[in-house]
Image: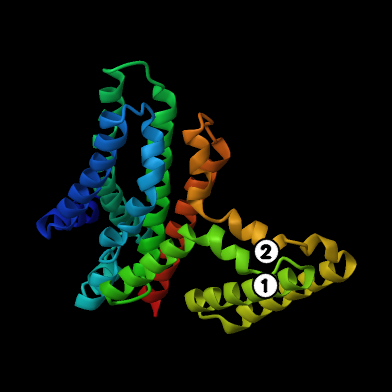
Amino acid sequence: MNAVYKRDLKSYFNSMIGCLYIAFIVALVGIYFSFYNMKSGYPYFGDVLNSVAYIVFLALPMLTMRSFSEEIKSKTDQILYTSKVPVGKIVIGKYLSMVTVFTIPILILCFCPLIISAFGSHDFRTDYSCILAVFLIGCAYIAMGMFISSLTESPIIAAVITFAVLLVLQLMTGLTSFIPSSEIGSFIGCLIAVIVAGLIYYSLAKNGFMAAVLVVIAGIALTVVYIVKSSLFANLLPTFLNKIPLTQSLNNFSLKTFDVTAIIYYVSVGCMFIFLTVQSIQKKRYS
């Protein structure tokens, strides 16, 4: 794991991708920090992070697009697959290398509240809670991008898909206004979601029978619930989709509320996509 971590971390700086990402994030936040906190005298750095977070996250495909796609494209993935190192350690090594690059600008941003405090009273707990939330959301999105990268041999395609997914997540709240909130509309939407989940399972496990069984069981369960108590589906799908975006709860931290539930959600999403990446690589290893 250490060898994979060191090799990937070194490659980010040899190719200048890591330096460019760090410079971009520091410059972006620095501009907002200079204007809002320094020039305008606004004492809350958490609100600045909340304003630029979506740009920070949309730049993450720069880091994740090459994690596995480049290995698959250059055929060096075969070396990893045939090595004695467990797949889990390979995935974690690559993941930690990306998290390390992402951590560098986050650590630099930790000096901003200290600079603000030099000019007056300041709430460190709120600002550092926001920084922690941004860090954990970024780690979850890195895991998501790494999983997408493991599905294709083209870094460009991996970057485009990751960017599209993150963009949809950022715009999810607005997009849900176009989704029917009626009982039948939510029921049909849930059935479609079950079918999509079945297709994802099939793409990972290549077990069509098990995927079909799971889809049928879930579909029957949803149908029974709808027949027995259809009122449960009223506005269900829009409400559920509104809770998916990780940045939805970021406002809570800037409002001086340390949201433990959100922290658990961020970590859970990251762990889930790391697990899915391991399964994706395992499938390639034994295919």
How packed mark 2 is, by other alpha carbons closer than 10 Å (few <14, some 14-19, many 20 or more), is many
Specify the farthest residue to the front.
40
In the image, what residue occupies the spot 64% across and 69% down?
179
- Would residue 276 appear left or right of 118 to someone viewing this image? right
Whichever of callouts 1 and 2 sits on the residue coming sooner in the sequence is 1
Specify the farthest residue to the bottom.
208
Count of marks placed on residues: 2
Disc number for residue 237: 2
Vertical comparison of 204 with 65: above or below: below
Tell me, yes or no, if residue 104 can be seen here: no
* Position in image of residue 278 (x %, y %): 41, 63
Which picture quadrant has residue 7? bottom left
How packed mark 1 is, by other alpha carbons closer than 10 Å (few <14, some 14-19, many 20 or more), is some
Colouring chosen for the image of the structure: rainbow
Q: Which amino acid lies under the numbered mark 2 shown in the image of this protein?
A: Leu
- Would residue 122 appear left or right of 107 to someone viewing this image? right
> Helix, strand, or loop for circle 2?
helix
1 and 2 marks in contact (CB < 8 Å): yes
In the image, what residue occupies the spot 49% across and 47% down?
266
Q: Which amino acid lies under the numbered mark 1 shown in the image of this protein?
A: Gly
In the image, what residue occupies the spot 58% across and 72% down?
197
Vertical comparison of 116 with 198: above or below: above
Looking at this view, is 126 or 266 the one in front? 126
Q: CA distance from mark 1 to mark 2?
A: 7 Å
User: In which quadrant will I find the C terminus?
Assistant: bottom left
> Helix, strand, or loop for circle 1?
helix
* Position in image of residue 255 (x %, y %): 51, 32
Which picture quadrant has residue 152? bottom left
Tell me, yes or no, if residue 36 can be seen here: yes
- Say which residue label 1 marks: 189
* Position in image of residue 256 (x %, y %): 50, 29
